[in-house]
Image: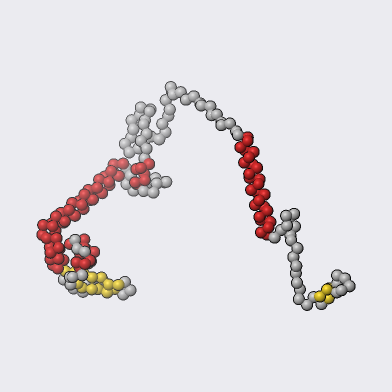
Amino acid sequence: MLPRSNHFNIGTKDAQRDYFLQPADLKQLPCDVVAFFGCGCSKYYSAADLQQAALKKHGSEGLRKKQEARCKRENNKRLREEQAEQAKVELGMVGTVPIGYSNHSDLKRKRVCVVDLTGEEAVPGQEKLDVPAPQNHTAPAQQKVVNPPINHVHDATLQQTVAALRKGLLTQTKKAMGFQMSGAPKSMKVEIPGVTQQTDGNMWAL
C-alpha cells in the first residue's frame, strides 16, 4: 500500500539512511501513517521536512561530509564487487561450482597450485592434477617403527581393577532388582483376601 499523499513519500528506513536521522529525530516531524491490515502501520515523511531536520542536526557542512563519505563507501563496495566478478571470469568459475564445494569462495580456498614437472605448456584456466614422478626419483628409505615395551605389571593391575569394578556393579544390580547373592529371587509374601489355612495341615479353604 502506498502513502495517501504524494508529499509524504519517504519511508522510515530511507529517511534514517539518506538523511542520517535517528528515531528520536523522526518523532518530531509530521508524517503520514498508513495502516496495513494485520501488519501494523508504516510512516512516511516529507523530503523538505527531512532535509530541514538534517541541516538542523548536522549543519550544512556536516551533512555534506556525511553524504560524501557514504557515496565513497558505496563506490568502494561496488568496485570490490566488480573486481571479484572479474576475477571469477578470469578463473573460469562463473556459473560452475564442482561437486563437493558449497560456493565459489570455498572453491578458491581449496584450489591448489600444481607444479608441472613434465615440461608441457600449461593451458590457462586448467590445472594438471596427474603429475608423474621423475624417473631418477628414489624412494626414501623406510624407517623401522619400534613399538614401545609392554608393561605386563601395569596390564595385570588394570585387569584386576576392571574385574573388581564389574563384581561390585553386579552386586549392586542384584540388590536393586531384588535378587539374592546366589542369583535366586527373594521370597515374597502374598496375601489373598477370603482365603484361610486349615489347622490340620497345609490345606486352604475359601
Q: Is residue 185 left or right of residue 136?
A: right
- Is residue 202 visible in this depiction of the protein? yes
Q: Residue furthest front?
A: 199
Residue 30 x/y as whole percent: 18, 72
Instruction: Identify which residue, 51 or 106, lies in the foreground.
Output: 51
Please provide percent x and percent y for residue 47. Answer: 15, 66
Count of numbered badges drawn on the protein: 0
Residue at 75% from the left image edge and 72% from the top image edge: 191
The location of residue 79, given as percent across then percent down, is 22, 48
Task: Name the residue at the right extreme.
Answer: 200
The residue at 37%/37% (across/down) is: 112
Quadrant where the image shows the N terminus: bottom left
| Quadrant of image for the C terminus | bottom right
21 versus 161 height, above or below? below
Colour scheme used in the picture? secondary structure
Q: Is residue 129 left or right of residue 59?
A: right
Horizontal side of 114 relative to 141 (left or right) equals: left
The answer to whether any part of residue 96 appears in the image is no
123, 110: nearer the viewer: 110
Residue 177 quadrant: bottom right
Residue at figure coordinates x 39%, y 46% from the top left: 101
Instruction: Tell me where residue 140 appears, x and y as whole percent.
Output: 47, 25
Relative to 130, residue 79 above or below? below
Taking depth in this image into account, of 35 and 83 the one nearest to the observer is 35
Q: Name the image quarter holding residue 185.
A: bottom right
Q: Residue furthest left?
A: 60
Residue ID at (35%, 42%): 109
